[in-house]
Amino acid sequence: MRKPGRHLFVFAGIVACASLSIFNSFAQSYPVKPIRLLVGFAAGGSSDLVARMLAQKISEQLSQPVVVENRPGASTAIATERVATSPADGYTLLLLPSSTSILSALRAKLPYDLERDFAPVSRVSTTPLVLIVHPSVPARNVKELIALARSHPGKLSHASEGVGTAGHLAGELFKSMAKVDILHVPYKGGSEISVAAASGQVDMGFPDITSALSLLGKVRWLAVTTEKRSALKPSIPTLSESGLRGYVRSGWTGVIVPAGVPKNIIAQLHAVIDKIVNSPETTESLNKLGLEPQASTPEQFAAFIRSEIAQNTKLIESAKIKVE
């Protein structure tokens, strides 16, 4: 049999180099068409406003339109599934809220797996929850509140936006770590909680800081739930420094894409979002919404999502939380 000539190997090398060049040119030219950023809530909410701010800034950086697409319903599962089943080409993004990680722990059967079916890009924002009490509650700090709750088991009540919500789980974590028995009273939204807390229908709650700011003068702030004090209200201590060492809960948003998106595209998206989130202009815009900028690497965000789902699952199981 005749052995391949030298010219055949040269030709094969040329073809390989040409293919690599074509692949690189496609990778380097991303994006070449509009990008979609899906949100699992209706227009007008804080997540939607974050998405629109982010979309505008990404569009400016990448010189392509970024269209915000609202897909509300099923506690964000509709939008999440839509992104999970989209092509892994970097043209479909999801603004991931903390409530979606709660949903993954709360519902055993979802049409997607938050860890398996997505690739994290970056966190975008964080927002503290605030431990508030009605002025009639004779507790000026967290230690006094814990002592009061222990001396009157089952007598104090805490409000939330509903079963399995951020405020509910924040209360369950407080009860678990403080070893107290407090009655959970679910409402149907943040506005109802504000009325209940201000009027004294409930003794305490864990609203997000934006809602808590609207209650200044009507309730007493005891602590924020984040790891560090909030830049929006730095005089208020954290729960961790108030005696519940290690207590950390927060609302947050981030950006994820379908699993399988090329790493170079994820790196490009991350670089753009990181630049946006760390800009003074974005900090100002987020602060107006009661949020704080919180960028991260894709690896850090992946680890954070895993830890959030694990903590949520543990809380839901220990508190025997079930949804109808």
Image (cartoon, helix red, strand yellow):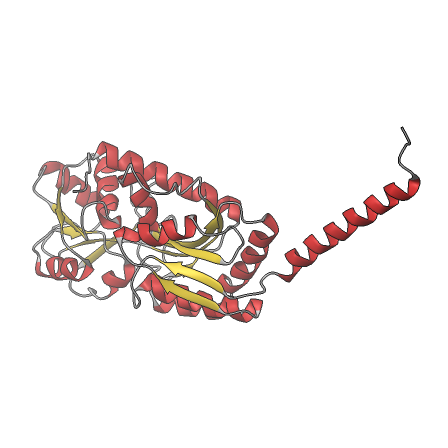
Q: Quadrant of the C terminus?
A: top left
Q: Is residue 257 above or below residue 279?
A: above
Q: Position of residue 152 (x, y in %)?
A: 8, 39
The quadrant in which residue 306 appears is top left
Q: Which quarter of the rendering shows the N terminus?
A: top right
- 172 w.r.t. 230: above or below: above
Residue positioned most to the front? 1
When the figure is inspected, residue 286 is found, relative to residue 251, above or below; the finding is: below
For image coordinates 43% across by 43% down, the residue present is 304
User: 234 and 103: which one is in front?
Assistant: 103
Picture residue at 51% right of the left edge, 66% below the top: 34
Residue 222, percent across and down? Answer: 24, 53
| Residue toward you, 306 or 206 | 306
Say whether residue 124 is visible: no
Res. 173 in view: yes
Q: Is residue 99 left or right of residue 264?
A: left
Horizontally, residue 199 falls left or right of residue 96, namely left
Residue 199 found in image quarter: bottom left
- What residue sits 52% from the left and 69% below the top? 59
Image coordinates for residue 263, horizontal then vertical, percent: 59, 48
Out of 12 and 271, give the one closest to the viewer: 12
Q: Nearer the viewer, residue 139 or 221?
A: 221
Left or right of residue 315, residue 204 in this image: left
Q: Position of residue 292 (x, y in %)?
A: 40, 60
Count of numbered circles on the image: 0
Q: Residue at x 57, y 67 (%)?
A: 62
**Residue at the limit of the structure toward the top, as seen here:** 1
